[in-house]
Image (cartoon, grey):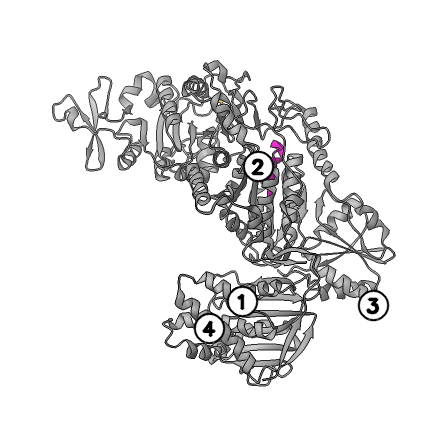
């Protein structure tokens, strides 16, 4: 039957169901397909901390959101256009974020009395008229796939597992997307289980055909390709981008990479990725605890490897003493903190930016380290590379802050060529006149000699060092000198910190300053308001210690400065202390990153518009 | 993949010199108290290293915190004085990254078994080729005399003025329980035996744990006298030697016999038992090693000294290398640009 085609710039679709319903898979397949057709894409998976939370419950809802469009999309989307709800609980949890007139695709078997009760519905929302403001499509997916796969040899459980693929087929139809990416994926994934493979291929097409033939679906949507810089692209999550950034950094440093890590949500995927890179000669240790994770990385760095440890907040707390040791030893080391909502165990799968203080200050004694932050999923690659570069050049531990949102979310990434990236290889000292704490005059980095170098046997350790010789020293003036030297060395990193770029209007009343993962939401709000004629200025920071040279000038130039953060104002506190000016904050600590409209509302409030 | 450190890894293998113990002295004044058991351990280590046919620059000594952990400063090799309890974790990363190095740990009972206990058990089970010399003085000495995890029940220390309440660790049994491939015990007074144990540890491929009863003259003086002095030694210790029966006593007149799984002291002079009835030590027998380790705090039995267990199994770092090599054989040396492209990529022009 004839369908009407509508053209859109951008769409947010959310696949939601039980944690066992395969929503993460449908979502990631949809996002990859969408990106491969040339859309810009930004995604975010959202799942409960429990691996298999009780079926049908409100807290067991798992979802995957994909925001895609013909223009650059910087967030996973504020409000949902299309909600795929596999059961009553997933509808209830997500409905508040659905746009008016938004599309709901609901699977009726997830709305039986049992599921309605679990979702705490008094009556069935699919039938009681409460969804009249939405474009509701009610489909009994379970019966359709059961009928189609009867006699396929699949168990009822395996048949039930194909319903997310059916929903994916409908979504592909709805947005005019090709099936082949997912078809290839199914063929590869189930190559050893032909009956499962065939069932999934069949059901994918079935979903597509169902929508095509159903009079209930009157419209299809088309989103044209986004204008991205020419190059080779792929979709990437922040965690994978960190893993690749480190692999590439090690290659460009001509050093072997060593990862010491302990599993922790939401950083574990970095360990998963790197542990699979054996064919690249990469070594890792899944350590017995967080402390061994960092200490083994320090040991490897001492032996001349590029040392890496990856963690999240609770793990960073445990690594603090060892970071201090790396400061004292002046060995290069990269520490990646994929921040999550704290304190304590907090909300492990939820994002937050509240580890800035511990990254900057969380050590005993005077122990400064460079701290940098990635701003998007794909930027995690660049910043991981940058962390390694700074660590090697200045012989210092470097903390890279990402967060649960960046780690899990994905977006298209223009893959750089190895030749585009700088050589960051260090120099190992081999001359007999070696002095372990003699420094490079420009960077103040100490000279690095590796065990195994004949004639350069020397001792280093956590006790205070005598300047130049590195011998143990308790001399009062020497201690002051060494404390100052270590601090000056980290200050010298400023030579490698690019000036910040000021976006927007020099004569604006309000300057926005963000850092890390809030970039997408702030930039979206900023662009929108400027399009509407509001004068605004915006700076987004990636270097948090040392701060860019030209930042202070901008802070003093604008009458008002607003610092939105997913914490209670940690960057604001740092900037106020350093630049002695009172700033405004916007603090969201809900385990979620900002939505653009929240930033927009705050800007309007500040500017009285 | 070629790296900058390949040169350093391979280079010194071909330049080997003949050393003397002096070559292993750093020249820094040793700052242990006069009479500390540490001196003897240091000398024996310096005595055996020249015999190992390993270039000096390949040795790395890593320590944690405590009196024992000053050890690396006194050695003219690469040294790393790390933080409390973490020597084994640092060493694990170093050994995995640099299997060419001979990595040694100087640690104490508090450093190794209390704050560092987790790293201890895990390093041993992984069987990294690292030599652990644990100076056991049954007290915290650098912090001035508190109870340690090997202090005995009832021991009076500054932190246990009314006596220690805890049951002490039995380090050899703990090491065996952690799947250590080499476990030995010696004591500071017996220089020859120490040398032998250090040499055995050095030659063992895999984790080697040597517990050394070390006298702390200040905070736990004479703690081991009841079995380590020339007068008490013969009656109160028994030497474990592979393939030999367990005989002890001033006149070699006693032995250890197994009654079921229970060791018992028997006299060789009252004609009930002969040497043929005695337990014969077998370093390859893990069950036996546990039985022997469990003799440790049994006052009716002599304390075993020597190698409890010495078994061969692949080292962790070998397995790491093997996995890498096998992956390269199966898939070819990794192409990083391909890795970056991932499963699905597309061109935008
Ligand atoms: S306090 Fe005890 S262990 Fe420490 S150096 Fe003195 S005697 Fe040796």
> Are labels 4 and 2 on one chain?
yes
> Are labels 4 and 3 on one chain?
yes
Distance between the Cα atoms at labels 1 and 4? 13 Å
Distance between the Cα atoms at labels 3 and 2? 55 Å
> Are labels 1 and 3 on one chain?
yes
Magenta span has A330? Answer: yes
Screen quadrant of the N terminus of chain A? bottom right
Residue A112 percent across, percent down from the top left: 47, 80
Residue on which the image places disc 2: A255
> From the viewer's perspective, is the residue at label 1 or at label 2 nearer?
1
Distance between the Cα atoms at labels 1 and 2? 40 Å
The residue closer to the viewer here, A553 or A187, is A187
CB within 8 Å, label 4 to label 2: no
Query: Compared with residue B92, is residue B334 higher up or lower down, i.e. above or below?
Result: below
**What mark, if any, has residue A202 been given in the picture?**
4
> From the viewer's perspective, is the residue at label 1 or at label 4 nearer?
1
Query: Please, what secondary structure does the residue beneath circle 2 have?
Result: loop
**What mark, if any, has residue A609 been given in the picture?**
3
**What mark, if any, has residue A180 been given in the picture?**
1
The answer as to whether callout 2 falls within 8 Å of ligand 1 is no
Q: Earlier in the sequence, mark 4 or mark 3?
A: 4
Q: Earlier in the sequence, mark 4 or mark 2?
A: 4
Q: Quadrant of residue B43?
A: top left
Residue A192 percent across, percent down from the top left: 40, 61
């Amino acid at each position: 039957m004839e369908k009407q085609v509508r053209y859109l710039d951008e769409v947010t679709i959310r696949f939601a169901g039980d944690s066992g319903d395969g929503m993460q898979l449908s979502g990631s397949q949809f996002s990859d397909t969408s990106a491969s057709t040339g859309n810009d894409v930004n995604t975010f998976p959202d799942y409960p901390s429990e691996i298999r939370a009780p079926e049908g419950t409100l807290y067991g809802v798992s979802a995957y959101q994909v925001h895609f469009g013909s223009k650059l999309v910087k967030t996973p989307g504020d409000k949902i256009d299309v909600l795929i709800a596999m059961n009553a609980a997933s509808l209830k949890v997500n409905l508040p974020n659905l746009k008016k007139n938004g599309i709901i695709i609901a699977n009726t078997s997830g709305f039986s009395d049992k599921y309605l009760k679990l979702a705490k519905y008094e009556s069935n929302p699919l039938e009681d008229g409460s969804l009249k403001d939405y474009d509701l499509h009610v489909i009994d997916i379970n019966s359709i796939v059961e009928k189609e796969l009867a006699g396929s040899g699949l168990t009822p459980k395996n048949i039930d597992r194909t319903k997310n693929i059916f929903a994916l087929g409908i979504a592909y139809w709805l947005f005019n997307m090709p099936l082949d990416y997912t078809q290839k994926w199914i063929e590869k994934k189930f190559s050893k289980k032909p009956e499962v493979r065939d069932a999934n291929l069949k059901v994918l097409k079935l979903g597509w055909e169902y929508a095509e033939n159903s009079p209930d679906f009157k419209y299809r949507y088309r989103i044209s390709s986004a204008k991205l810089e020419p190059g080779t692209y792929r979709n990437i999550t922040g965690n994978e981008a960190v893993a690749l950034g480190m692999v590439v950094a090690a290659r460009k440093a001509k050093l072997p990479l060593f990862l010491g890590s302990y599993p922790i949500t939401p950083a574990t995927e970095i360990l998963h990725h790197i542990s699979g890179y054996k064919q690249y000669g990469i070594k890792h240790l899944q350590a017995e605890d967080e402390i061994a994770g960092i200490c083994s990385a320090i040991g490897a760095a001492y032996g001349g490897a590029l040392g890496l440890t990856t963690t999240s907040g609770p793990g960073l707390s445990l690594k603090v003493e060892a970071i201090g040791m790396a400061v004292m030893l002046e060995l290069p080391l990269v520490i990646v903190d994929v921040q999550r909502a704290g304190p304590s165990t907090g909300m492990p799968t939820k994002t937050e930016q509240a580890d800035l203080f511990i990254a900057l200050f969380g050590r005993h004694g005077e122990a400064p380290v460079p701290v940098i932050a990635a701003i998007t999923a794909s930027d995690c690659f660049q910043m991981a590379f940058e962390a390694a570069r700074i660590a090697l050049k200045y012989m210092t531990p470097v903390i890279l802050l990402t967060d649960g949102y960046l780690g899990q979310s994905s977006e298209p990434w223009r893959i750089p060529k190895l030749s585009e990236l700088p050589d960051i290889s260090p120099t190992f000292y081999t001359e007999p006149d070696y002095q372990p704490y003699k420094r490079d005059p420009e960077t103040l980095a100490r000279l690095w000699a590796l065990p195994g170098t004949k004639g350069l046997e020397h001792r280093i350790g956590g006790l205070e060092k005598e300047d130049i010789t590195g011998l143990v020293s308790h001399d009062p003036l020497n201690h002051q000198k060494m404390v100052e030297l270590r601090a000056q060395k980290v200050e010298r990193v400023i030579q490698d910190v690019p000036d910040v770029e000021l976006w927007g209007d020099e004569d604006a009343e309000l300057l926005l300053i963000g850092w890390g993962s809030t970039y997408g939401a702030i930039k979206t709000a900023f662009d929108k308001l400027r399009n509407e004629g509001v004068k605004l200025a915006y700076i987004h920071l990636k270097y948090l210690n040392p701060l860019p040279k030209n930042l202070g000038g901008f802070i003093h130039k604008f009458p008002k400065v607003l610092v939105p953060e997913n914490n209670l104002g940690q960057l604001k506190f740092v900037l106020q202390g350093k630049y002695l000016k009172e700033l405004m904050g916007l603090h969201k600590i809900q385990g979620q990153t900002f939505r653009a409209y929240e930033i927009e509302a705050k800007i309007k409030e500040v500017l009285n518009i | 993949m070629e790296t900058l450190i390949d040169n350093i890894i391979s280079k010194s293998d071909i330049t080997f010199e003949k050393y003397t113990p002096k070559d292993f002295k750093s020249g820094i004044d040793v700052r242990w108290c006069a009479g500390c058991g540490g001196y003897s351990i240091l000398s024996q280590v310096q005595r055996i290293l020249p015999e190992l046919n390993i270039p000096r620059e390949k040795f790395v000594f890593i320590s944690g915190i405590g009196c024992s952990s000053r050890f690396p400063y006194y050695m003219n090799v690469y040294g790393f004085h790390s933080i409390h309890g973490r020597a084994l974790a640092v060493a694990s990363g170093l050994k995995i990254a640099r299997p060419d190095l001979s990595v040694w740990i100087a640690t104490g009972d508090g450093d190794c078994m209390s704050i560092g206990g987790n790293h201890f058990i895990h390093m041993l089970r992984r069987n990294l080729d690292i030599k652990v010399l644990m100076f056991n003085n049954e007290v915290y000495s650098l912090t001035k005399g508190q109870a340690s995890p090997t202090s005995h029940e009832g021991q009076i220390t500054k932190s246990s003025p009314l006596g220690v309440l805890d049951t002490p660790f039995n380090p050899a049994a703990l090491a065996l329980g952690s799947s250590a491939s080499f476990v030995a015990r010696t004591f500071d007074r017996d220089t020859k035996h120490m040398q032998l144990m250090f040499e055995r540890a050095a030659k063992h491929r895999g984790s080697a744990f040597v517990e050394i009863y070390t006298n702390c003259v200040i905070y736990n003086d004479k703690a081991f006298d009841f079995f380590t002095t020339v007068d008490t030694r013969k009656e109160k210790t028994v030497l474990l030697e592979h393939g030999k029966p367990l005989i002890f006593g001033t006149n070699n007149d006693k032995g250890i016999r197994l009654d079921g799984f229970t060791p018992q002291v028997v006299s060789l002079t009252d004609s009930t038992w002969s040497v043929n009835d005695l337990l014969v030590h077998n370093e390859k027998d893990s069950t036996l090693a546990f039985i022997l380790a469990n003799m440790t705090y049994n006052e009716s039995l002599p304390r075993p000294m020597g190698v409890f267990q010495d078994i061969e199994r692949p080292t962790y770092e070998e397995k790491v290398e093997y996995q890498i090599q096998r992956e390269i054989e199966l898939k070819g040396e990794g192409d990083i640009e391909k890795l970056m492209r991932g499963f699905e990529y597309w061109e935008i022009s």
